[in-house]
Image (spheres, rainbow, N blue to C red):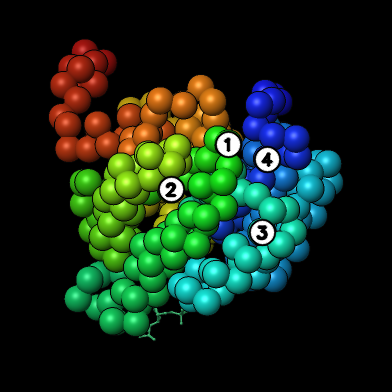
Amino acid sequence: MTRDTSGIGAEPPVALVTGGGTGLGLAIARRFAKDGYTLVIASRSAEHLAHGSDVLRAEGGTVLTVPTDVREPAQVDALFAKVKEKFGRLDVLVNNAAGNFVARSEEMSPNAWRAVVGIVLDGTFYCCRAAFPLLRASPRPAVVNIVASYAWLAGPGTAHSAAAKAGVVSLTRSLAVEWAPHGIRVNAVAPGPVRTEGTDRQLWVSEALTESVRSGIPLGRFGTPEEIASAVSFLAGREAAYITGEVLTVDGGQWLGHGVMDLLAQAKGRERA
Ligand code: COA
């Protein structure tokens, strides 16, 4: 699908996706390329950037890759300076870069905590802050932050990520109000379980765990990166022009099913028995 990007200026609009070289971030970048945007992808890994740009270029996209550790404010400032120099504009910022792993809180080192909170919460703030002058100059600016429903539930085993995502939900709402006078909308997408190379390596570390997660999703399956990308595209686009400070959960109903006893399923089980 190609989005109508008319009315957004003469040049193609520009979208920047952090962590855009692989997995969910790459799916989001591919969606924006299809929507008619020029892409900027940022990642710590040169290998991830090369992969992402190969995929985007093979599909006809225009892409700038910028090696960046979003935990480092100076690198983040340099990223947005590069965007300004190269394109002179930025219309959409997607804060997708994340770090996560499963660990008991009492066994998590301070450095492990800092690594995840630094990428997710500090990184999102640094990017928003540095993007502000460019976004303010855009005719239709939007920020979309990637969070998770454990931000408002609980994240046993991923307390660092849950705390950081909760911070990003709060930041999303604060910025939505602060930046509304500038026309900058700030929203978030909370993906449910999605399988990518990264999540398979960091989260879905056994078949038993994967199956137990799947069985807790009312729609009965993991989401696809493309389904998440579609929600991000919606929130960044003109159809969402009156939405700001919102979190769109795209999780097959997972968080609603969290802890809810499904009496209907149990009754059906009894009928079958
Ligand atoms: N369990 C416990 N501690 C862990 C860990 C794990 N699985 N993985 C990393 N850590 C700890 C390290 O031991 C280190 O702490 P220490 O110095 O006290 O030993 C700290 O976290 C930082 O790890 P390091 O590898 O030095 O930092 P990094 O910046 O290179 O890595 C991470 C960042 C930790 C987020 C790493 O997991 C990563 O880069 N992951 C890939 C991206 C990702 O997770 N995406 C999300 C997919 S769901």
Q: Which of the marked residues, 2 or 1, is nearer the chain's N terminus?
A: 1
Q: Which residue is mark 1?
A: 139
Residue 174 against residue 236 in the figure, above or below: below
Q: Which residue is mark 4?
A: 13
Q: Which of the marked residues, 1 or 4, is nearer the chain's N terminus?
A: 4
Mark 2 lies on a secondary structure that is strand
Residue 79 spot, x, y in % from top left: 61, 66
Q: Which residue is mark 3?
A: 84
User: Which quadrant is the C terminus positioned in?
Assistant: top left
Judge depth for marks 2 and 1 and give the one in front.
1
Judge depth for marks 3 and 4 and give the one in front.
3
Identity, as a three-letter code, of the amino acid under mark 4: Pro
Mark 1 lies on a secondary structure that is loop
Q: Which residue is mark 2?
A: 145
Instruction: From the viewer's side, name the closer residue of 244 and 50.
Output: 244
Judge depth for marks 1 and 4 and give the one in front.
1
Mark 3 lies on a secondary structure that is helix
Q: Is mark 2 within 8 Å of ligand 1?
A: no
Measure how far apart labels 3 and 4 are at the Cα level: 13 Å
Identity, as a three-letter code, of the amino acid under mark 1: Pro
Residue 167 spot, x, y in % from top left: 28, 57
Q: Which of the marked residues, 2 or 4, is nearer the chain's N terminus?
A: 4
Residue 250 spot, x, y in % from top left: 41, 33
Ligand 1's image quarter is: bottom left
Residue 171 spot, x, y in % from top left: 31, 52
Q: Which of the marked residues, 3 or 4, is nearer the chain's N terminus?
A: 4
